[in-house]
Image: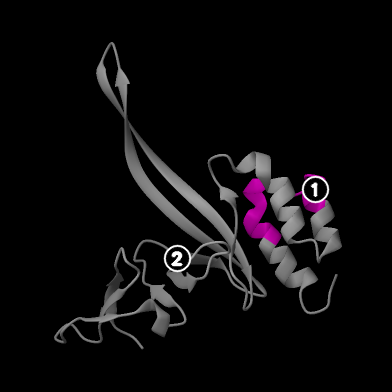
Amino acid sequence: VKGEGRIKQNGAIKFRRNPADKKQEVSFDSVTKVKVKNFYGPDKFFVLAKIEDKRKPLVLELIEDGTVQLLLKTKSGTSYTPNSSMGTGMTSYTKTDYYVRKVDEAAVHLGANQGFTRNFKLAASSYFKDCEVLATKIYNKEYVRDDIEAVVRYYNTECSQGKK
């Protein structure tokens, strides 16, 4: 269904087919994915994902799609720190949480861009252990945390559908 709308903080979608129509609130449960038109770059896709060990699903950005999906949750903000010589300092930040999920499974949190380095080798090699070649490449640091998109693409092309 094409139209215009926005994703609200609570995960609902405010939607209308035409600018003259009244906006309706649609639950994200009733859609497979939402395509967001980006006039300054590639379009973005969002999905509702059940998260392992969490009660409530999250709306996450779909980065890579296939047997394994790479999903992101990005949060931006500003932090204020006291600075004795100049008053209060202001710092902007963006935190990105990385999730992966196989078809019909709950998403697994692999880490975040802050503090991701320590855990990536163990978390990713464990998650992709059904593809021994990939798990070994991760464990031996042929793939590092910045390669997460390449890791998922590798799994989807080389490891899924019986390839190992």
Q: Which residue is mark 1?
A: 139
Element under disc 2: strand
Q: Residue at left 41%, top 76%? A: 34
Q: Residue at left 41%, top 80%? A: 29
Would you place residue 94 above or below residue 154 in this image?
Answer: above
The stretch in magenta equals 137-151
Labels 1 and 2: the sequence-earlier one: 2
Q: Is residue 23 visible?
A: yes
Question: What x and y, as percent, mark residue 45?
Answer: 45, 71
Amino acid type of the residue that numbered disc 2 sits on in the rendered structure: Leu
Horizontal side of residue 68 vs 155, given as left or right: left
Amino acid type of the residue that numbered disc 1 sits on in the rendered structure: Tyr
Q: Which residue is mark 2?
A: 58
Question: What x and y, as percent, mark residue 90?
Answer: 30, 30
Foreground: 54 or 87? 54
Element under disc 1: helix
Foreground: 72 or 108? 108
Question: What x and y, as percent, mark residue 73?
Answer: 46, 57
Horizontal side of residue 137 vs 64, given as left or right: right
